[in-house]
Image: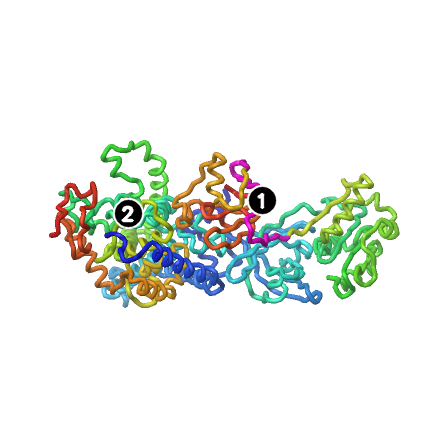
Amino acid sequence: MTIRASLARLADMFAYPLRHSHYVELVNPLWTTHALMARVVNVREETADSRTLTLRPGAGWRSHRPGQFVRLGVPIGGQRHTRTYSISSAPDREDGCITVTVKAVPAGRVSERLVRQVRVGEYLPLGEPQGDFVLPESMPVHPLFITGGSGITPIMSMLRNYVQEYEVVPDTVHLHYAPRERDVIFGGELDTLASTQRHYQLFRHYTQDGGARFSAGQLEAACPDWREREVWACGPASLLAAVEAHWQAAGLSHLLHVERFHAPVAANTDQATAGRVLFAGSATEAQSDGVSNLLRIAEDAGLNPKHGCRMGICHGCDTKLVSGCVRDLRNGALIAEPGDTVQVCVCSAVGDVELAL
Amino acid sequence: MPIPSHLTPADIAAFGSEVEAIRNEVMASRGERDARYVRRLLKVHRCLEIGGRLGIYASLALLPQWGHALAGWAFFWPVMVLGVLTLGAAKILENMEIGHNILHAQWDWLRDPEIQSGRWEWDHVCPSDQWKHAHNVKHHTWTNVLGKDADVAGYGLLRLFSGQRWKPFNLGNPLWALLLAVFFEWGIAIQELELGRVIQGRMKWSALRPMWLRTRAKILRQARKDYLLFPLLAGPFFFYVAGANAVANIVRNLWTYLIIFCGHFPMDVHVFTKAEVENETRAHWYVRQLLGSCNIKGGKLFHIMSGNLSHQIEHHLFPDMPSNRYGEVAPRVSALCAQYRLPYNTGSLTRQFGTTLLRIVRMSFPGYSPLLDGPPPKRAPRARSTGDTATPA
């Protein structure tokens, strides 16, 4: 153990049951080691509905690989909502900051808050960089990028990394789709790259201004050697489906890397919906009628979960929602955010549900 | 004392749904303001903790032996006392308004992994998961049910209600109560171990071992901090700091004891037999929580320093509601009680603790006390009262 780590352990003994880092937090939230935070140091409008946030990550941040994403916590009404965003900056910037570029999703409370309300100086909880949508460590000879809308963000990190690290973008073809010209995120920067980098070919398509969606002919015209290129594609589900189908038909799926955006979909129903309940921690599956409480369902499935009052008072049966949606039987409230606490004794499943239990 | 007979089952159901409506309304309105409150609270606690400990060390620089202008007992003591009281206040805040309430899952909705009931460990010798079982599961579900709720049975040590059988051991009630007050933290840690059952031979030591090991680990960590590491920092003044920390812990013990005993033991509070709570509905449960809890009147600071357990009634009706909301809910609950002609037991600290002390003394002697426990039931509480003089005193 290093001296530093030993000292930290000793300091934690003094701070018990907290950790010394909880006291350090009083001075500067970015110096903590118990939880990673980021300070918003700049906000920049990209288009009418997207914005780039420059974040200064706290101690404990390790640099990302271009193309990776982070989990970002966004407090709304005091409650933390966590979403993942691709990092749009190159790794190891001189100022130590990263950027994420967020597009406001219609009726998306979290993206709306990030695009319209987040102010410089706010602290947001940040996760470690994650994901394997990355370029190989050794530079590939010629990538093909296919992006749609805010799917540009991980690719932007890759392009910026080329410029920052090598000053040269290798032989690259980039097909980018956006509804209209004014919706293109990083439009100016992409144009500059296209005009200054000899080997970077950019093809922009505006699907609402008469441009066509992704098609075989379009690909053939822009990139005749597409069969030999490794592909990184990121964008809306419809674009990715078309791209995947095309490469699969060509038997070249192994060349295709895809990054999807997941938006949790809340069930919007007042009716009881039967479904399957997966108790992930005990690898047990059961059927739910959408009415019975989940504690009962677990017990009927032969499990013996920890519990107490069976009336929602003691929180002895709390577990975490992995996916799906449950209803609080006391007031009908729906709980659909992965990671949320579920009191199984007073909650029923709404459709298919996975619990950590 | 049973549930008041003037209420029909329909009345009780209506009362229950009105209580539920208050809960739903407040829970739906949780937001930014509450999040700010708890975050500020955590900051204040951490600052008080640092301030208190610094105060204790600062007082050492004022010991007469240093011979400088300010050295002398006249300067040492005020600074030392201030440091100890600040540290005590930090521990009170941590145990009550912060720890107790986080462990009730009042702040889980924030989704902040740092303030979750499942992860929080508090500055107390009882491991938080064991305490949650004794408190959230047993005490909050079975509030004031004799034979079920260990708290109401005087933590297994005291006789507090006429419905409890008198034993000669209870003659020591005032002494046991005083000892429990001074070592309250330890009493709570030991309570969950159910040593009584081992001593009576109803449980084996070996069955206790896993829990004891967890408790021991917690005790060692707590003691290492207060009675080894911080005192060592003071070098030759080791015992000054260890003593100061011990006093701060005892200050916390006395205060928590004072507040907690006022929650369920003042005059006119109700207790229940197991038979009375059989097949209880959720609405009945609300009525029982109301009848079994007592509030203490006081100012804003008093409520915060008592972990809002001065709003014991609201806390027992809504154990997972953020505690900063109890104050605004209290007038609505008491209005509801007036409407249904249910008692709402509230009073000054003097009234509530005074009658609690009276209870401790009175119950050290056998017999039924109509003053404290109301008119005796027509039929003596079954089975439990066999050794008791069930006739009115």
Query: Which one is nearer the viewer's eye here, B255 or A196?
Result: B255
Q: Is A41 placed left or right of A182 in the picture?
A: left
Q: Which residue is mark 2?
A: B276
- At a point 30% along the width and 40% down the height, the residue shown is B193
Q: Indicate the position of residue B188 as horizontal and vertical percent values.
A: 29, 47
Stretch in magenta: A263-285
- At a point 32% along the width and 65% down the height, the residue shown is B339
Q: Amino acid at mark 2?
A: Glu
Q: Secondary structure at mark 2?
A: helix
Q: Which residue is mark 1?
A: A352
Q: Indicate the position of residue A255 as horizontal and vertical percent values.
A: 77, 42
Q: Is A250 placed left or right of A331 in the picture?
A: right
Query: Can the viewer see residue A16 in this picture?
Result: no
Q: Are marks 1 and 2 on the same chain?
A: no
Task: Please give the chain letter of the residue carrying mark 1.
Answer: A
Based on the picture, tell me whether residue B393 belongs to the magenta stretch: no
Task: Tell me the crowding category of disc 1: few under 14, some 14 to 19, or many 20 or more residues within 10 angstroms, Cα based.
Answer: some
Disc 1 and disc 2: Cα gap in Å? Answer: 40 Å
Q: Disc 1 vs disc 2: which is toward the camera?
A: 2
Q: Indicate the position of residue A233 as horizontal and vertical percent values.
A: 75, 49
Task: Tell me the crowding category of disc 2: few under 14, some 14 to 19, or many 20 or more residues within 10 angstroms, Cα based.
Answer: few
Residue B255 is drawn in which quadrant? bottom left
